Image (tube, rainbow, N blue to C red):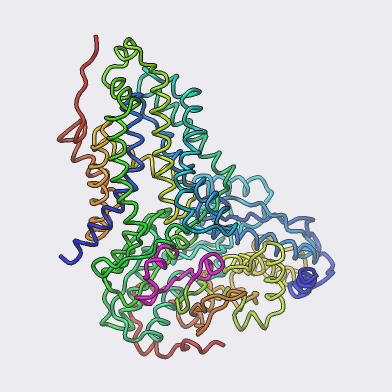
Amino acid sequence: MKTILAAVALTLAAAPVLAQDAPEGAPDELGMGIFTFTSGPAAAYGMPGRNAAELIIDQINEDGGIGGAKIVPTYVDEGQGGEGVVSEFRRLAGDGSVDVMVAALSSGNCMALAPIADQLEMPMVTWNCDTHQLFLNAEHPYVFRPNSSTVPEFVAYAAYVAQNNPDAKRIAIINPDYAFGHDAAQIFTAAMKAFNPDVEVVAELFPRMGTPSFNTEISRIAAARPDIIFSNLWGGDLENFVRQASARGLFRSSQVVLALGESALQRVDLPEGVIVGVLGDGFWNSPDAQDNEAAQAFAEAYHGKFGEWPVFPGMKMANTILVVKQAYEEAIAEAGKWPTKDELLAALSDIEAETLTGTVTVREDHDGLVDQIVGVTTGGGDKPALAKMARYPGSDITPPVGADPIEWVSTLTPEFAAGLPAPGSYE
Amino acid sequence: MDLILPMLVDGLAASALIFFIAVGLTLVFSVLRVLNVAHGSFYAIGAYVAVVIGGFVMSAGASPWLSFPILFLSAALVAALLGPAIERTFIRFTYGKPEAVQILVTFALFLIFEDLQKLVFGVQAYYQDAAVSVLGISDIGGIIYLNYQLLLIALAVLTVLALRLLMRNTRLGKMIVAVVADPEVSATLGIDTRRVYAAAFTIGVFLAALGGALASPNSGVAPGLGAEAIVLGFAVAAIGGLGQIEGAAIAAIIVGIARVVAIYEMPALEPVAPYLVMLAVLLVRPYGLFGAATQRRI
């Protein structure tokens, strides 16, 4: 009953225009290609994305779809590898079954797909890939990211640490051995040194993805006696690391920062006081989301359908699909009929959308401005919750359009960090 | 200097698991003369069976100490079910065939098992750490280690001793040694080589499954476990000398220490450390540390 009520509430909240008349030229169906990992270790992170897509699309379709067109999703598993992902993108773009792509989870796949989207003139809206290199020295007229990039995400963690642990000087880093891990290490280190010039990196490890045992890395980190341990491990690797590090007391001897920690809160027992966040504002239990009926209804419906609360990858996916929906609706309103591809692109290029968890603004470079939520774990409870939260405005911690991101980070100052919202200010 | 003790402990703990992966592989090669790529699958299946049975028993409220016999029983179960069956249905057809054929057949088996694992166990990771929790921790050189890691070192040493005892003091062991030395003469003397092959292969499967089962309490069990195991197993077996049990033990220690030193001193080298060691050893000793060239029979 609770689930049904939640679904009804979500239906009402997620549909600003109910029982609308279909605009002139509206198709019966709107094809949407959705790319995420549904197999392999990354599926621990990717499946919540797929689940959220299913749920939000069902809700939108129950409301009459987008401008009367039902969303018909085609899910593509990124677990098949880069070549397969590119082939599937080309196939879906070529056979006319898809009007817009929501892709992808992996930054590597986004980097590979962006030029193809431009080449095939296929609108592509990214839902998770965070690499700041996506729009760096590259224009992608058909690609939009209504999410944040690695720079504001990891600057936010550095700012939180600078305020929460002002005396911390020794930093250890353990990140996955690919661009996301190395980029995060570079950004976090640069930001930490900008906020506190005395900071030194005492250990920097990049285990390959899928490493079953982190025991030697844990010993190495423990031997370095760090004040702060930063990690952006994710999926199965994050769960493995947390279990092994927790058993060996790493969480007691250092302040641990898990950049993607919220995604594992329901799967592993994280002790109290671990700094975690959601790489954006996609936390369904944040103060803003708690005040948002649609967000709470979505979370309840998700819990009812899948047996667990949505994690931030799921919220990012749902938010992205809602951005696509709003872009179509704005384009329909502007054109007075079903929009052309160019009209859709125009709507996406400067959209400011209300999502389930906040507001996203797409800038002129097609990159998004999204707030960053960081907090600490509470040590358990019925529902995932964070304490001592800070919500950093996206516009404050995102490099300006055209700026070299890493150079911009190095220009930050301790005063800049001190001027940002303090831990605990977002309650 | 103060890192030497942690490096040593980490190195030996890593070596223990590497040894379990490699020893069965090298035993099977020494007896059957088959390079079994599917060995990695038995390692993974041992891990899966251990976490599934362990999880079921623990969720029924059993004592966590029961998780230890479960690890060994899981390996025995995998060996009993798969060892003789696989040897009779696939492996025996590769005896005496070129190495390329053996590798193709066992690689096909490996791929089949990979898909079967996903079919049976799904793609999500499994965890069952009762054995780790119940043993507690120790402080060595200011670093906290799991007592379970220390237990693995002891179990690896015990396994080397047990295999020596098996080979030197039991009828089956003596028959295995005889078959390794000369299968034709052994058959002429009345040894049922077919049964010896099946027994040796089953022992190999047991050792692989035991390695996986023993690794499972302190790591997630997910798709891909078998692939990593077999690559590392081949490297260690090659360094020690194919067919050399003591060689596998020494090679495991060298590789384990090499990986740990790389993580401590030059992390970027860690993924290639085992293969750099293999390269260095094989350049100097082409048949491995303990291996020897075999005479071609006329």
Image point (29%, 20%), residue name: B178
User: Where's residue A343, x and y in %?
Assistant: 67, 65
Report whether B248 appears left or right of B221: left
Q: Which residues are magenta?
A: A243-270
- Quadrant holding the C terminus of chain A: bottom right
Residue B269 visible, this orientation: no
- Classify B211 as above or below A128: above
In this view, the residue in front, B60 or A346, is B60
Query: Would you say residue A391 sits in the magenta stretch?
Result: no
Image point (30%, 64%), residue name: A219
Please tell me in which quadrant of the rendered image residue A325 appears.
bottom right
Report whether A133 appears left or right of B63: left
- Classify B108 as above or below B296: below
User: Where's residue A260, x and y in %?
Assistant: 48, 68
Report whether A170 appears left or right of B120: left
User: Where's residue A129, x and y in %?
Assistant: 50, 62
Please tell me in which quadrant of the rendered image residue A144 appears.
bottom right
Report whether B293 appears left or right of A32: left
